[in-house]
Image (cartoon, helix red, strand yellow):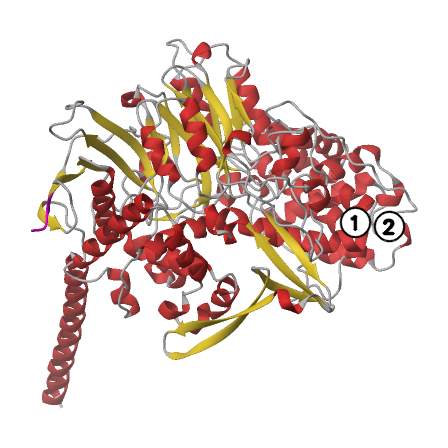
């Protein structure tokens, strides 16, 4: 018996040893494969097509320093670096824009691919590529060649493809245009989707009620020209009377029954601002820019510094053009930065860059085009998708016998070019303004400063002229609605060297009058953020880099303070809300991570806006709105705050939602809903429900979202965050300041540029997550590269 037990123990020991050995060998094999897919950091390589040798260096943060004699050679070198560090992310970007994710991920990506493929972006941009000037084709081709050389230079294909059991496909110049197309999607896609739902709401509600539910502006506006829009007219009882609507009480009680935190739509946008030389101690202008986007690992941006030296034999021998800033993997140029003479930055402009065209049953069929699109699907047979277009505008929706086509500026080939790459050569603000107006890119607020102390605002990206946006805002257009020609660069709206010596944009409306009508409204952000930036700039007669940088982290919550004035008296007068009253009394007026009062008031505001929107829009929302081909249920937009506050102030009986005895009763019900949401229905003390608890960062790698078990290895640590939407320091769980840049042209050595998520997409790279801790800690990372840590010499291939 003892012998049998001993034998069993030996057998078990051998089995466990064998299993452990197998696990260790598997882990070792994975580690070795991962190591083999690391980017090359040092040595000498050759690249076909180079005109002269170039140098590729990296500093401690992985900032790429590219030195060479011409722009095309540096594009080739940048493509090499982008591919080695970020090819998988670049691949996802082009596939997302083109509707080609199913070929990599299988059938689960098919619904999204079908939505995107209806726009036929690859076909459109392949045609655009053929029409581009020779110099732009050369730059894109050099970049694509560099990307493919970088991919081929890896000893093992990028680690993500090992995990997915897939082979990466080579890059071509059209793929770079698709990267720009994906930015159009990111910055404008939600705008035209919202406009479709709101246009249906207008049809059902009528102009008067719709304009009240969707005001265009408010007293919070901070347009650059000082313009204000008239407040909306409150509806009369004849137009809207909630007292006469059965069933509203039940609908609203269901609305407030859950524990989920309410959220307003995250505005994909940015902040930028500038002061001219007359507002600084040294006479040089200062520019700040923080672009708000979804945050992930690695960062969407890639830090780079271009140094182009004059070749031997030139009359200007010895001169070096140095430009530093951020590149977008997939494209060969700087997006934002400085060239020593000019510094520039962007925020999303949110103009109306689209039209929805409503086609009746008997629309002219001769203007209809049919296209066949083939969708490759990993692990399954390919599918064919028929795409219908009306005068080149894809038919995307059908509702009650009508077809709806989208005419979008991103569908036009002329909206894509490489003009922005010329910003490296701009010598002053006026040259930069002309380059911005000619640039093919998503339409942006462009703020620029130069070494002479000048500042300016204009729009970047191609703009349609002769726009009747007043009659097209959230309205469907008839089939004969005319397409518009492009606006001439000389006719772009601009503000040059304002008397105040300051400029600011924050996705808000910038202009009124005819120029404002030219831009239109594609979903402007609420003005509170812009107004606060404007007032911070106005507080000082003179600024330096420290005072400009401080605005990046301004957490004062002025919008929510206005709600505190409304809610505090109610809670102080209600014994049942004594704890809430104490917490609100203790609030410091800021969106700080340790504050409970801020989270309370924010939640009360959102519950209130949601409740009022549900009550006021309910009579006009189609019960069939959940069907995919029908209009989606519209949500309130930013300026709905104006209408809600108007009603809360004037307290009309006919607009009080059923189920509430008074407006005070309604507000206290929202307080109760906020408390229930924050304490989890009594699972934690309300005093522990800080803003940081809810607003902790969640900056993830795309693969850990699909495979959560990888999160411990791939994601950045979660940290409670201060900041929010309607104040300068924008910070959400996975959305916020994708970069922070402050600099004065000509003094780049004092400039700062930081970003979250790190420079490299390889978790074994020394640059994976590099710089993220400084971004979290609000530490200034230098704009310019530090001492070289790694160096690759690149020679022309024989």
Local SS, label 2: helix
Local SS, label 1: helix
Place residue 741 in its image quadrant.
top left
- Horizontal and vertical percent position of residue 659: 83, 51
Is 11 placed above or below 164 here? below
- Horizontal and vertical percent position of residue 388: 57, 68
Label 1 sits on residue? 616
- Horizontal and vertical percent position of residue 615: 78, 51
How many residues crowd around disc 1 within 10 Å: few (fewer than 14), some, or many (20 or more)?
Answer: many
Using the image, tell me which numbered label, if any, was put on residue 242: 2
Residue bounds of the magenta highlight:
794-798
Q: Kindly tell me whether residue 114 is visible in this rendering.
A: yes
719 sits left or right of 261 in the view? left
Q: Nearer the viewer, residue 208 or 655?
A: 208
- State the CA–CA distance, disc 2 to disc 1: 8 Å
Point out the image quarter for the N terminus: bottom left
The total number of labels drawn is 2
Q: Measuring 57% from the left and 25% from the top, which residue is drawn there?
A: 532
Q: Is residue 643 magenta?
A: no
How many residues crowd around disc 2 within 10 Å: few (fewer than 14), some, or many (20 or more)?
Answer: some
Proximity of marks 2 and 1: CB atoms separated by less than 8 Å: yes
Place residue 570 in its image quadrant.
top right
Is 490 placed above or below 710 here? above
Place residue 213 in its image quadrant.
top right
If you read the primary sequence from the N terminus, does the residue marked by circle 2 or circle 1 appear first?
A: 2
689 sits left or right of 518 in the view? left
Is 21 placed above or below 215 here? below
- Horizontal and vertical percent position of residue 353: 58, 45
Q: Nearer the viewer, residue 706 or 367?
A: 367
Q: Kindly tell me whether residue 261 is visible in this rendering.
A: no
Most prominent secondary structure in the magenta stretch? strand
């Amino acid at each position: 018996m003892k012998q049998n037990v001993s034998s069993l123990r030996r057998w078990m020991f051998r089995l466990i040893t064998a299993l452990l050995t197998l696990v260790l060998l598997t882990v070792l094999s994975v580690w070795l494969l991962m190591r083999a897919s690391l980017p090359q950091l040092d040595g000498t390589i050759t690249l076909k097509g180079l005109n002269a040798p170039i140098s590729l260096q990296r500093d401690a943060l992985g900032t790429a320093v590219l030195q060479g004699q011409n722009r095309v050679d540096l594009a080739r070198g940048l493509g090499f670096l982008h591919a080695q560090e970020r090819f998988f992310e670049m691949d996802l970007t082009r596939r997302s824009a083109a509707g080609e994710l199913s070929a990599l991920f299988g059938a689960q990506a098919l619904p999204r691919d079908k939505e995107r493929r209806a726009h036929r972006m690859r076909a459109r941009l392949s045609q655009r590529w053929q029409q581009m000037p020779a110099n732009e084709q050369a730059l894109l081709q050099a970049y694509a060649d560099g990307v493919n050389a970088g991919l081929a230079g890896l000893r093992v294909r990028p680690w993500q493809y090992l995990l997915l059991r897939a082979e990466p496909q080579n890059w071509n110049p059209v793929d770079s245009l698709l990267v720009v197309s994906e930015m159009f999607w990111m910055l404008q896609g939600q705008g035209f989707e919202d406009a479709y739902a709101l246009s249906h709401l207008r049809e059902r509600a009528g102009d008067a009620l719709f304009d009240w539910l969707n005001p265009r502006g408010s007293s919070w506006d901070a347009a650059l020209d000082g313009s204000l829009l008239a407040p909306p007219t409150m509806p009369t009882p004849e137009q809207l009377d909630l007292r006469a609507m059965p069933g509203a009480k039940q609908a609203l009680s269901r609305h407030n029954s859950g524990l989920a935190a309410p959220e307003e739509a995250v505005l994909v946008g940015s902040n930028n601002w500038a002061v001219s030389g007359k507002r600084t101690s040294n006479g040089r202008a200062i520019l700040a820019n923080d672009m708000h986007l979804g945050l992930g690992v690695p960062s969407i941006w890639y830090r780079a510094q271009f140094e182009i030296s004059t070749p031997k034999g030139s009359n200007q021998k010895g001169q070096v053009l140095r430009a530093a800033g951020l590149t977008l993997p997939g494209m060969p140029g700087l997006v934002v930065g400085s060239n020593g003479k000019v510094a520039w930055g962007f925020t999303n402009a949110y103009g109306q860059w689209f039209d929805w065209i409503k086609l009746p049953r008997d629309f002219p069929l001769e203007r209809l085009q049919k296209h066949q699109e083939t969708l490759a699907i990993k692990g399954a047979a390919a599918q064919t998708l028929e795409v219908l277009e009306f005068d080149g505008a894809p038919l995307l929706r059908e509702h009650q016998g009508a077809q709806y086509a989208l005419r979008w500026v991103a569908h036009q080939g002329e909206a894509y070019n490489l003009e922005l790459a010329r910003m490296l050569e701009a010598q002053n603000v006026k040259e930069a303004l002309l380059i911005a107006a000619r640039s093919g890119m998503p339409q942006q607020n462009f703020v620029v400063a130069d070494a002479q102390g000048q500042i300016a605002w204009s729009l970047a990206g191609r703009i349609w002229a002769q726009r009747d946006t007043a009659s097209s805002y959230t309205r469907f257009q008839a089939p004969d609605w005319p397409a518009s020609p492009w606006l001439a660069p000389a006719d772009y709206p601009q503000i040059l060297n304002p008397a105040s010596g300051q400029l600011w944009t924050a996705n808000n409306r910038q202009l009124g009058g005819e120029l404002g009508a030219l831009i239109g409204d594609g979903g402007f952000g609420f003005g509170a953020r812009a107004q606060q930036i404007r007032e911070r700039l106005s507080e000082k007669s003179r600024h330096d880099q420290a005072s400009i940088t401080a605005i990046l982290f301004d957490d004062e919550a002025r919008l929510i303070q206005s709600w505190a004035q409304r809610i505090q008296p109610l809670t102080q007068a209600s014994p049942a809300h004594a704890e809430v009253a104490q917490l609100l009394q203790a609030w410091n007026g800021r969106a700080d991570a340790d504050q409970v009062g801020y989270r309370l008031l924010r939640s009360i505001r959102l519950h209130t806006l949601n409740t009022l929107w549900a009550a006021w829009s309910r009579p006009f929302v189609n019960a069939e709105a959940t069907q995919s081909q029908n209009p989606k249920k519209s949500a309130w937009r930013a300026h709905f705050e104006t209408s809600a506050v108007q009603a809360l102030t004037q307290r009309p009986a006919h607009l009080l939602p059923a189920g509430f005895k008074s407006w005070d009763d309604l507000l206290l019900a929202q307080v109760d809903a906020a408390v229930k949401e924050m304490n989890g229905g009594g699972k934690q003390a309300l005093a522990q429900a800080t803003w940081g608890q809810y607003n902790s960062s969640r900056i993830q790698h795309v693969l850990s979202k699909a495979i959560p078990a990888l999160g411990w290895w791939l994601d950045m640590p979660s940290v409670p965050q201060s900041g929010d939407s309607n104040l300068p320091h924008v910070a959400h769980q996975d959305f916020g300041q994708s970069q922070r840049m402050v600099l004065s042209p000509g003094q780049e050595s004092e400039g700062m540029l930081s970003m979250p998520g790190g420079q490299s997409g390889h978790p074994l790279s020394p640059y994976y997550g590099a710089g993220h801790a400084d971004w979290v800690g609000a530490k200034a990372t230098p704009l310019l590269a530090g001492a070289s840590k790694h160096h690759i010499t690149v020679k022309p291939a024989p």
